[in-house]
Amino acid sequence: MRSTTELLRQVRSWRAEGHQVGLATVVSTWGSAPRPVGGYMAICSTGTFVGSVSGGCVEAAVVDVAQGVMAEQAPRVVEYGVSDQDAWAVGLACGGRVRISVVPVGTAGLDDDVLDEVIRAREAQDPIVLATSLDAGAHELLRPAVADGGVASELEGAAREALLTDRATLLEVGGREVFLRPHNPPARVIIVGAAHVTQSLVPLASEAGFDVVVVDPRAAFASVERFPGVQLVRSWPAEALAELGLDHRTAVVTVTHDPKLDDPALLAALHAEPFYIGALGSRRTHASRLERLEAEGIDRAALERIHAPVGLDIGARTTQEIAVSIVAQIIQALRKGVA
């Protein structure tokens, strides 16, 4: 099962069929735990499960815990690590520790209406934060504005930060532990130019979890035959990017080498706040590009936001290797905040 939305839809399906369901969430990790904080695993009363909380190390133990949680209709928090006898038994012997919240889905834990609202928000690409009180298993939804709107409570401020960083977090509020799990829309990669390298870049970026848009006014290039199942925008880049909107969860990559297409896209990106801007081309090509953009009023400090030549320096030669280097650099910028 590839996405969180698919996992939550499966939970809803099991509930509609009359089954009890437990939802396990990684709330903290130490050392080399193999799953990130916020990872989900859903367990049906039939014993079937989807998702993962440890990459296979403790799943069997969590299924047993979830069966008890469903039977008792009471949440539990469990922890596994190398110092625990149980951890060796379930296979988490690689040096990590993981803390997992397991709650029943329904009136005693994650309310069905809250579950439905999270699914609706994800489908509508509406940023939302699910707050879980670990002691009681109670959940509430938070919709903090990403932009700082002034004075906010500690919980609202932490929820805003969780959305901005796309990182789940555990904090203490009023003497209780609260876990904040952001549900952001997928980050986007807008590729300007339906070039040969784009055909390698699109599937790699999609597989990495990005929503991908290809912008190119040339219908012969931006064709369904060349890019099946991909969102194609056959407008000039300035118009297309204005329509699509550029925010802090958007990456822009230009690949045409044609100033008529690349330059307007880069100007639009430099006047917005995408988390990544990249441009294909040699150092010589980029030097000429910088001169043109500077003549358009962009200062040198802003121009340094452009990654060019695009991609991590891994010695890539083929279009496929170049695509790998670009996706890797985009992920680096998204996850590590590398400007």
Image (spheres, rainbow, N blue to C red):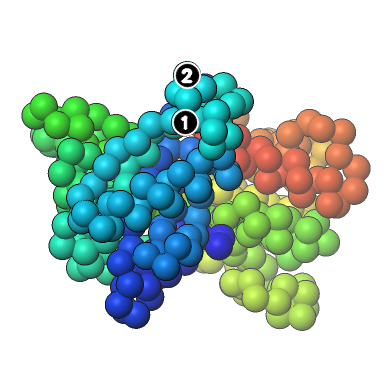
Q: Is residue 267 visible?
A: no
Q: Which residue is mark 2?
A: 83
Q: Position of residue 1 (x, y in %)?
A: 55, 62
> Mark 1, mark 2: which one is toward the viewer?
1
Q: How many numbered discs sit on the rendered protein?
A: 2
Q: Position of residue 181 (x, y in %)?
A: 33, 45
* Residue at the image position 51 percent from the left and 22 percent from the top: 82
**Left or right: 330 with respect to 176?**
right
Indicate which disc residue 296 carries.
Answer: none
Q: Nearer the viewer, residue 28 or 331?
A: 28
Indicate which disc residue 86 carries.
Answer: 1
Decide: is 1 above or below 318: below
**Left or right: 43 with respect to 288?**
left
Q: Position of residue 237 (x, y in %)?
A: 59, 62
* Residue at the image position 77 percent from the left and 80 percent from the top: 225
Spatial CA distance of label 1 from label 2 is 9 Å
Q: Nearer the viewer, residue 202 or 56?
A: 56
**What secondary structure is found at the residue carrying circle 2?**
loop
* Residue at the image position 73 percent from the left and 65 percent from the top: 194
Question: Which quadrant, please, contains the C terminus?
Answer: top right
* Residue at the image position 76 percent from the left and 46 percent from the top: 324
Q: Nearer the viewer, residue 268 or 159?
A: 159
- Which residue is farthest top? 83
Amino acid type assigned to the residue bearing label 2 in the image = Ser
Q: Is residue 64 visible?
A: yes
Amino acid type assigned to the residue bearing label 1 in the image = Asp
Q: Position of residue 190 (x, y in %)?
A: 59, 57
* Neighbour tally class for label 2: few under 14, some 14-19, many 20 plus, Cα within 10 Å: few
Decide: is 69 above or below 45: above
